Image (cartoon, grey):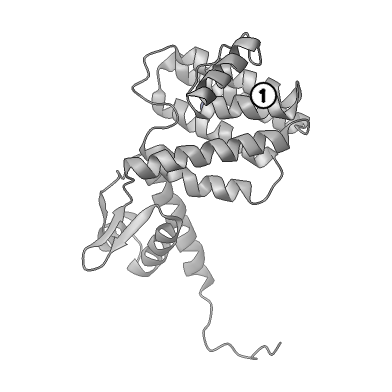
Amino acid sequence: MDVPESSEMPIDFDRGLLSDRIYDLVRAMIKDSTLKPGEQVVESQLARRLSVSQAPVREALKRLTHDGLVTHIRHHGSFVTEFSKREADDARIGRMALEGMAARVAHGRIDDTTRARLTAIVDSMHDAAERHDIAAFRETDFEFHRAVIEASGNVYLPRMWDILEPSLRSMHVLSDPGYDGDWRVVAETHRGLIASLDGGDPDEASDLFVAHAMGLATHPEHPIGPAMNRAIAAARAE
Ligand SMILES: [Zn+2]
């Protein structure tokens, strides 16, 4: 391969780093709903707000558009992506397939570090439940499910999760704020999910994660009990 001695297009590393940071920042603003679905993202306003020039903001927005978090409409500008009910339903189905697969692959290969991390996330869920901080609960919920997908060791599964995550967030598929049950039970359910990755067999772990993704309530004392299996069977028969 010929490498030119002097590049005609010098790479501006500083700007590259800056746009990475802006990307992370705006992504976080979309995730925590500081920027809401449908809201316009104005390049010049954002640049002013962050005290940077427009070029790195433009680059960051291009990346977010590529990720699907921002939608660019010609002659109108950039907007935080809104997802239709259909897209969110499709994302939910994608999530079931993805999590079922990830649990199957991760089963029996959770090391101590990962187990400690998952357990710490469940503890954080309990803290959030005690404080009635649903936003924090949701963040830990997303963190938990992504951590399990990472635990599969498959390099593509987390990337697939990243594609689904914006839709799942927009429809409150995880940690629905309208849920009026006991959030501590929801938190504890995740301990059952961790246990399923260590015990039983891969099919059971997979079934449990699918059931959880379907929103079926699981009882923490019977994480992989017969009642759960009946619930899954009933849901499948629908
Ligand atoms: Zn969950």
Looking at numbered disc 1 in the image, what kind of residue is underneath it?
Answer: Ile
User: In the image, is residue 46 above or below residue 135?
Assistant: below
Horizontal side of 188 relative to 62 (left or right) equals right
Q: Which residue is mark 1?
A: 194
The extreme front residue here reads 237
Number of callouts: 1
Q: Left or right of 179: which side holds 194?
A: right
In this orientation, which residue lies closer to the viewer: 204 or 130? Answer: 204
Q: Residues within 10 Å of mark 1 (few under 14, many from 20)?
A: many
Up/down of 42 relative to 85, above or below: below
Which quadrant of the figure has residue 212?
top right
* x and y percentages locating residue 209 in the rendered image: 59, 28
Nearest the viewer among 237 and 64 is 237
Residue closest to the eye, 223 or 38: 223
**Picture quadrant of residue 229:** top right
Residue 11 picture location, percent across and down: 53, 77
Residue at the far top in the pictured view: 221
Q: Nearest the camera: 232 or 7?
A: 232
Quick check: is the Cβ at mark 1 less than 8 Å away from ligand 1? Answer: no
Instruction: Look at the image and tell me whether residue 32 can be seen.
Output: no
Up the image or down, 72 lies above or below 208; here it is below
Q: Quadrant of the N terminus?
A: bottom right
Q: Residue furthest left?
A: 76
- Expressed as whole percent of the image width and height from the top left, the position of residue 96 reads 54, 35
Helix, strand or loop under label 1: helix
Compared with 218, 112 (above or below) is below
Camera sees residue 163: yes
Residue drawn at point x = 41 percent, y = 12 percent:
181
Residue 89 picture location, percent across and down: 40, 38
